[in-house]
Amino acid sequence: MSAPVAAPSLLARLKLLFRGSRARTAVPPPARSVRFQLLYERFREILALNDAVLQLIADMDEMRARRDADVLEALAPRMRRVAMDVFLMAKNLNQIADDRYPELYQALKEINGRIEAELANRDTSAAGPAILRLDAIRLGDAPLVGGKMAPLGEIRASGRWSVPDGFAVTTAAFVQFMDEAELWDQAERLEAIMATHGPAALPEACREVRQAVLRAPVPAAVAEALLGAYDDLAGGKPLAVAMRSSAVGEDESLSHAGQYHTELHVERERLLDGYRRVVSSAYGASAVAYRQAHGLAVREARMAVGCMRMLSPRASGVLFSRAFEQPRRDVVVISATRGLAEGIVGGTQDAEELRVVDGQLAAPSRLLSEAECRELARLARDLESWRGKPMDIEWALDPRGALFVLQARPLSTAVEEVAPAPELASGEAPIATGGQMACPGAAAGLVASIRGERDLDHFPSGAVLVARHSSPKFARVLERCAAIVTEVGSPSGHMAILAREYQVPAIVGLPRALEILVAGSAVTVDATNRRVFAGRLDLPASARPARVQSDSPALQALRRLAELVTPLHLTDPSSPQFAAASCRSLHDVTRFVHEKVFEVMFHFGDLAASDRQSAVTLQAHLPLNVLLYDVGGGLSEAAASTGRARVEDVVSVPGQAFLSGLSDPRIRWDHPRPLSGRGFLSVLGDGLAAPPPVAREVGRRSYAVLSDRYMNFSTKAGYHFSTVDTYCGTSLGKNYIHFRFERGGAAGDRRARRVLFLSTVLRALDFTVQSRDDVLVGRLEKYDRETIQARLADLGRLTLCARQLDMLMDSDATAESYAQSFLSGEFTAF
């Protein structure tokens, strides 16, 4: 087996992040600019780590939906790696935010502690003694003695019911046996054979593994302990024992009924052979297929072996504490036969079937007295009360009439079968096809077009949500939502995860959805097959499995782990509950860091303003005095060496796009603009009442921090402040633009109308906008590179056009008129 590969260090990850960047500045940066570099590098790492976390979340959701836990063994190291990634995200955020969020560490400590505890329970490396005597076994010893022997030890310890004397050869002994015989690789190949060649190839492959187990020597220490335990039990007298499987998980949530071998009447000289025969049965074709169907990996089939004194019963059989077809009625079912009941459980012989209904024997027995039947019914009720669920019990009566419990496991009760839903049928072709399935299923309803967050306020119950873009804010309406269709989005995104959590059929990435699916029209969304039909098709009742699928230990563990990873409780950044201390899952921490890092980066320009030593002056015909800071591939080498840059020296992708709009020749900013007299006077009035220019930072420079794919452009010119923070690369999930605009020189109502102008323009350009008084914040996230570039050019033009526009805002109609002029490209109005 190859040595484990160490996880890359933080420094190595940072090197990888920048390996693909364009050429760096040839001249070493001044010492004060190092903080720029570190801040940006940590920001970039947060974006990269975020993708890995979201991919794990999407994979775990898919595994749960498919009940696919057979990869859980491989998931454990990946979960530990992702937990470290989330820790690095939190650490990087605190480093660039001056340790503003220390509560993240405590939240992660609690989450990761629970993850580690769960993974420890899944650890397949057993530790413990080779032998554990029955008197010492308790229910909590199941990982060491298996699911069959642990309950028997607990029942014996209660003193209420008899269990034959015996001991368990533990899973620690089994692991030692498999290790020393070097059988793991051969056994684990069975999974690949089943997956690649199907069930037909399994019997022969299993036969080879079983033969290898039967040939392997039992480790000397295990053999010595096994023979010693037998001798202690025998006490110097002849003794025959029954050797029975007791695998981990057996007789618990999964019965493993009939999958493993039992050796009866085993005496000392056959003990080691009997042990090997029981162990080898773990690799029978039926057992392997059964485990794989329930998501149990080969190494999870750790086999303990129970050794119990053989009985010579007068009668024995099986006892159900409830009738499995009527689990709510007070009915105890007894199956009985003479002698040993192996034929009953193996299905090779008939048995007498008896029922005790409401405490009364329904019909007399040929084998048992009425008192014995009542005693069996009392045993059934007692064990059901102990375990809190219906029980399936093997029992035996010895010739003296003493009752022994041989096995006790939960009863698998039946449920009403429901036919699976038929395929959707329609005489018409679908009106839209494509995209990706984010959550399977089908639903019908009236289309509700969501073009902004405000549209969610009046979302009708049972509607089909159609939007340009996926958003975690849809969580507000998911309980009322029939289905979701978006033009842009990813199955690994926040909304898709929420849709699966709420089981809302969803398609993401469906082109022209808003255009094709008209608001108010009735549609049927078949998310499973990625198609949408006009009108309401007749849908069957929600399809349920033909029977309740029992959860394997692997699926139970997957569900518990998923609860620590995938749920998103922090969905509204404006809520007081959107806090580090409120994080209850890795998804919560990721979402919190992702939101807060943008707040930090929004103020990158403030840091730039304090460090002009490493700046490069932009030489361009603009109404702004711009200083440029290169943190990696943002400027040409010539510009870095001379300290001066032309527009063409800016090689940053977002920087180029923004400057192309900022320098648009159609906008004649250098020509005088007609001013409203009242607007001008309001500026004068405000100026007389306001602090002096130095305090207001009037006329300060603009600052642009650039890399090959990042830009933070901060403008503090005149009386208003604006910031554009953006990432524009090839990964749609990382791309975003955040825009903030505030203040101005005119009166408050005119500044508010300029915000109205900006809001109207930005919403038309697909931004999500929030505004209050004269402050506006716009966001555009998870769009392709070309769209981001186009919108950055629009923002460059908007920055010029909005300059001093507040003085012209006489009315709301004026704001709307200017917005329409901008959107139609009539820049002469500005």
Image: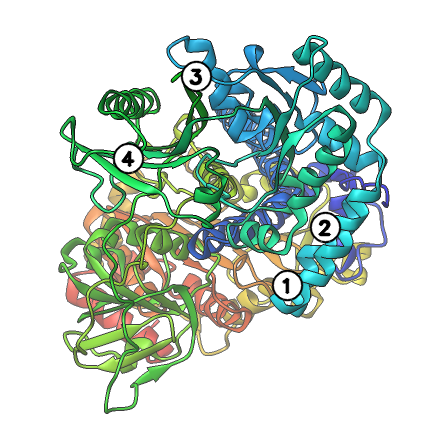
Q: Which mark is residue 155?
A: 3
**At which x and y percent is residue 752?**
23, 52
What secondary structure is marked by label 1?
helix
Q: Quadrant of residue 383?
A: top left
What's the distance in space between the residues labelled 2 and 4, CA to CA? Answer: 49 Å
Q: Which mark is residue 195?
A: 1
| Residue 545 shows in this picture | yes
Vertical side of 553 occupied by 619: above or below: below
Q: Residues within 10 Å of mark 1 (few under 14, many from 20)?
A: few
| Mark closest to the chain's N terminus, 1 or 3 | 3
What's the distance in space between the residues labelled 3 and 2, CA to CA? Answer: 35 Å
Q: Which mark is residue 366?
A: 4
What secondary structure is marked by label 2?
helix
Circle 1: residue type: Ala
Q: Residues within 10 Å of mark 3 (few under 14, many from 20)?
A: many
Residue shown at the point (43%, 48%) measured from the top left: 349
Circle 3: residue type: Ile
Q: Nearer the viewer, residue 309 or 122?
A: 309
Circle 4: residue type: Arg
| Mark closest to the chain's N terminus, 4 or 1 | 1
What secondary structure is marked by label 4?
loop
Given contact means CB atoms under 8 Å apart, are the residues at marks 1 and 2 in contact?
Answer: no
- Left or right of residue 788, residue 740 in this image: left
Residue shown at the point (68%, 13%) measured from the top left: 234
| Mark closest to the chain's N terminus, 4 or 3 | 3
| Mark closest to the chain's N terminus, 1 or 2 | 2
Q: Nearer the viewer, mark 1 or mark 3?
A: 3
**At which x and y percent is residue 363?**
17, 36
